[in-house]
Amino acid sequence: MSNLDREKIAEETLQIIKNGFYVKNDVKIQLPHADYKKVQLFNPQTVDAIVNDEDEMLERCLNASKECAIHVENMDSYEAVHRFDMDHALVMNFANAVTPGGGFLHGANAQEESLCRNSTLYKSIGSVQAKEMYDYNREIQSPIDSDYMILSPEVCVFRDSRAQLLDHPYMTAVLTIPAPNLNGRAKGLDRDEIRDVMLHKIKTFLYVAARYGYRKLVLGAWGCGAFGHDARTVAGYFSTLLIKEKYWQFFDEIVFAVYDHSDEQYNYQSFAEVFQDYKYLGDTREVVAKADDNFILFSDLMPCVSGGFDHVNRDYDIGYTQGIFLDGKGFIAELFNLEGMQDKQVAIVMPEKIFIGLSEKEYVADFKTGSEETWNIAICQDIKDKKEIVDPSVIEQVSNYLEENQVMDFNNGFQAFGCKGKDLNGENVIVMGYTLGEGNRVICKTNLEFWHYEDKWRRMRIKCY
């Protein structure tokens, strides 16, 4: 495909975005309704705050009990999202630091240009809000540019890797981050400085991705095209952070999409060989709690709340999860059926300090006779000094918070019960329980995904093709 052909496709892509639909085989295909120009801009100060907020980020990491599968694939970034059915994935955009989309409008063919041709990405990174990053990088004239990043949370992909229109467009998110250009402003940097800058930038990408709840990533040979970086060296940077420094524990799945159709396939082979060195990684961290050796929580990756799982009752304890709310606060949760009840319920444990201004005297009371029996589920076994929440306004406040953070959906109202107590670490926590349905009637829904207690502790798997 020539530059002129790609330039025409770029024009067509912009028209599709403007129209909100395209026609394929006489069938009108509507793009999903979304705000395609929506961006979240991270300036260097914001990025630095995220990286250095260890209390929020490291100690409340949500993936301590989840494996991370790493794949190395010879395919383009969007194809990886589609092939691996990566719901709520984040794609790394190998960006130009000073021009939105690089040479997208002029038929260039690097990774960023391909992403822009095949999706709505240009609508967001070319927006007025995103312009701040490009202006700043242009003005400072730094060989390493800056730590600016652009998150495009709603990107619609409607072309395949050959720029053919899809029958079914799909959504993903993209985080735009420029690598130092070794064929441009960064040409004079020495090897050690390049290494430090690349490791720092990759680390900031991983922190921002984890901080905003993206558990599935599509990475690749960042900076290994027109910017002149060596693929084996860059693969080593990723390996240092993900494997040696264990950043893989932030995520469930990582695909290195290394699109390489050259005869020697050096870029692809470099990543495949680097990551094939790691078949299994053991863990030597201190165990906080475990359930029959099936579920293990490690102290250094706990969220801000912790619960005991020593006495899992297989009759009614169904599954567990842990995570981070949109505001960075951690939680743990359990799906269960109480004995004698047919309907599933969910319990969520979260820090009391999320909710400012609560007075214990006003909203809690001692458990009534028999009440504590209903909280004999695994997640509450080690929560001490439990007191019932009796103030309906507090239950409503906590429930609103859970809905705002997209954990619960209360369109049909809710039936809730709450208590306050102390977790394994002695921290004050609030536990909220909700009945999800009665018979065929749906009362409320949860957006959480739960892992079965029967699952063994899952280590990291790495798969290369």
Image: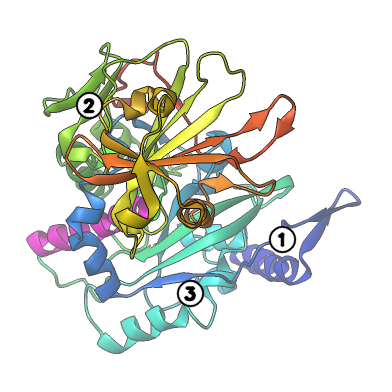
What is the number of the mark on residue 278? 2
Labels 3, 1: front one: 1
Does residue 67 lie above or below 74 as drawn? above
Tell me where residue 68 appears, x and y as whole percent: 34, 32
Query: As rendered, which of 247 and 59 lies closer to the eye?
Result: 59
Marks 2/1 in contact by CB < 8 Å: the verdict is no
- Mark 3 or 1, nearer chain start: 1
Mark 2 belongs to which amino acid? Tyr
Mark 3 to mark 1 CA distance (whole Å)? 23 Å
Give the residue displayed 28% in from the left and 31% down from the top: 307
Give the residue displayed 31% in from the left and 54% down from the top: 360
Region of the chain picked out in magenta, as a range:
191-211
Mark 2 crowd level (few <14, some 14–19, many ≥20, 10 Å Cα): some
Q: Which residue is mark 1?
A: 33
User: Does residue 206 belong to the magenta stretch?
Assistant: yes
Q: Which residue is mark 3?
A: 100
Give the residue displayed 47% in from the left and 16% down from the top: 316
Q: Which of the 4 image quarters holds residue 69?
A: top left
Tell me where residue 380 appears, x and y as whole percent: 33, 29
| Quadrant holding the C terminus | top left
What is the number of the mark on residue 463? none
Tell me where residue 231 appears, x and y as whole percent: 28, 47
